[in-house]
Image: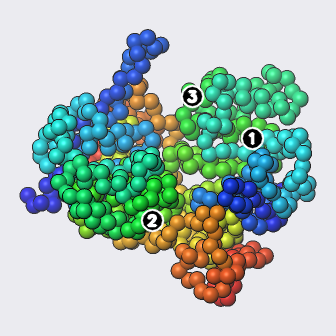
Amino acid sequence: MTDKDRPILETRSLGKRFSIGTRFSAEGRRTVHAVDNVSLTVRRGETVGLVGESGCGKSTLARCLVRLYEISDGELLFEGDDITSKSLSELRPLRRRLQMVFQDPSASLNPRRRVGDLVAEPLRIHGKLSSREIASRVAELFDLVGLLPDHVMRYPHEFSGGQRQRVGIARAIALNPDLVVLDEPVSALDVSVQAQIVNLLADLQEKLDLTYVFIAHDLSVVRQVSTRIAVMYLGSIVEDGPAEEVFSTPAHPYSQALISAVPVVETTPSGTRRRIILTGDVPSPLDPPSGCRFHPRCPIAAERCRTERPEVREFRPGRKVACHFPTV
Amino acid sequence: MILSVRDLKVSFRTDDGLVRAIDGVSFDLAESEILGVVGESGSGKTVSLLAVMGLITDPNAVIEGSIRYKGRELVGLPPRELRRLRGNEIAMIFQDPMTALTPVYTIGWQIAEQIRAHRNISKSKAMERVEELLAEVNFPNPHEAMSRYPHQLSGGMRQRAVIAMALSCNPALLVADEPTTALDVTVQAGILDLVRKLRATHKSAVVFITHDMGVVSELADRVMVMYAGRIVERGSRTALFSDPRHPYTRALLGSIPPLTGAKPRRLPAIPGSPPSLLRLPQGCAFGPRCPVRYEPCLTGKPDLGAATHAAACYRVAQA
């Protein structure tokens, strides 16, 4: 096995349950399966794009991947090492290598502290650097993410959204991580600024040999950055494969509908794209449908889909789908 | 013409001086036409339409210019008169349906209230109309939905309820401010379909504000691109998307990653970020980020001109 093929992060039938309500509420205590039976492999140097509608569990999965949430079922492996139930102190050396960038940089940066200080914080916690070394590392990081050296003394509110996200990225890469989980990193940004951040992430990946798990609801952004795509629906992965292939020939009816629904700029209006409009809404994960969870909205659902839940299977090397009647 | 806006200027008095949010915007809208207004945050797309609706109530706001609805001047109209038009002939759909609906009343009650504010009909008649409207916006079970509270509906359903409310009095003009931005793409596709259908059945003129070029290219008949409070390009959808002229429009279209075909290694990004209205650059506001700026751009503000497909740019005028 070469270094490239070695999984850096792997989940085996990972699940996350939340219990909601109390025994005094009308419906009593109930359990939501936010993430259900997810097996995902992230290889070194890859960018895995997680896509799906809001509420499909992609952010919950992301937080499980970096152990910000306790995992309810299954296993999480980092470089083959089971970290599912490691204690916080055991996790600490790993935290350096597993970082996360959040959607809203203004919510994840402390408004009372200077950004230079915010970027230096992980260095102070994890590194054994002198304050001079820390200052020079911060300057280096600012340069890497395209901020000016004199920006270190500023406060988060003095920056635009795009610059704040650059600060968030600088902080995530401060400790030379191996894997960065990015949860909607460009969603809150203006279109003209999005492209800058997408380019920055690509440059950093190349320079620093990073592996990304990238979550976004904007499919064209996901396609741009990802080498592999995992499509989620109601807590489970329904399709997984190389980005190009999933976008050009999606196998699962849900992926097909999702991709066809994206409005695109067509310079010559031809109407060649066939749009699949799904009926109904995403069902509540509190009360998921029987059988295949997509069947109530699926245009090709058959009797079998109502009763039997499809397993994730590999129908071609590298391409997986969970559907009884995939388009292959 | 349903709507005629001429040289609209909106300024706000702030502690840091006068901020001009809208700087000389003019446009027309015909019956059953869909006008797409695109721009980034701070470009003035929302403020200009709030001005049209007479919804800028800030005492520090200064509104100049002319807004004519069916020939009638709206600027300076007393609030009572405006209220008669709003929700009746002119309706608006906002980005976040949760803030447009009150959480303490049922959907049916809220829509009926809106109808009864403008029409002299009985409560039961109004409720019948509500059921029709909910059916029209594709509620699977309209009768049942009437007794639901907003929190019991999904985001897409809530936005449909808001649309039903906006349509309740057959408006001649519908202003939609980012109505699909908070929704998933699969739900968005359904809402866009609905807007198209309503234009056909109700003959309403629609102003559709969005930052998503894809949405505009699917929906609008004509498009207006805004930047820092001014219109930088205007044209029919086909003209604008097949032959974008303003460097900003071109750059914006270029920075959207493609969904099909070859993937560029790097996206052609626009450097910098949209300017703060408090510190607008001298000359053309896009100048500092523009790849083709030259001397005239540093001092003058280019005009849009009167052509059907026009761009406010010295380079374009020169070509």
Q: Is residue A96 left or right of residue A172?
A: left
What's the residue type where badge 1 is placed? Leu
Check whether the beta carbons of the residues at disc 2 and disc 1 lie within 8 A of each other: no
What's the residue type where badge 2 is placed? Ala
Viewer-side label of 3, 2: 2
Viewer-side label of 2, 1: 2
- What chain letter is assigned to the residue under label 2? A
Q: Nearer the viewer, residue B57 or B234?
A: B57
Q: Nearer the viewer, residue B237 or A123?
A: A123
- Residue drawn 42% across the image and 64% down it: A151
Q: Is residue A241 left or right of residue A146?
A: left
What's the residue type where badge 3 is placed? His
Whether residue B203 appears in this view of the structure is no
Question: How far from the left and from the top, in percent, is residue A197?
Answer: 41, 63
Give the SS element for disc 1. helix
| Location of the N terminus of chain B (image quadrant) | bottom right
Q: How many marks?
A: 3
Q: Is residue A79 left or right of residue B62?
A: left
Q: Which residue is mark 3?
A: B151
Q: Which residue is mark 1?
A: B167
Q: Vertical placement of A67 versus A2: above or below?
A: above
- Residue drawn 29% across the image and 35% down it: A69
Question: How far from the left and from the top, in percent, is residue A298?
Answer: 44, 39
Q: Vertical placement of B71 versus A289: above or below?
A: below
Give the SS element for disc 2. helix
- Residue A55: quarter of image: top left
Q: Which residue is mark 2?
A: A195
- What chain letter is assigned to the residue under label 1? B
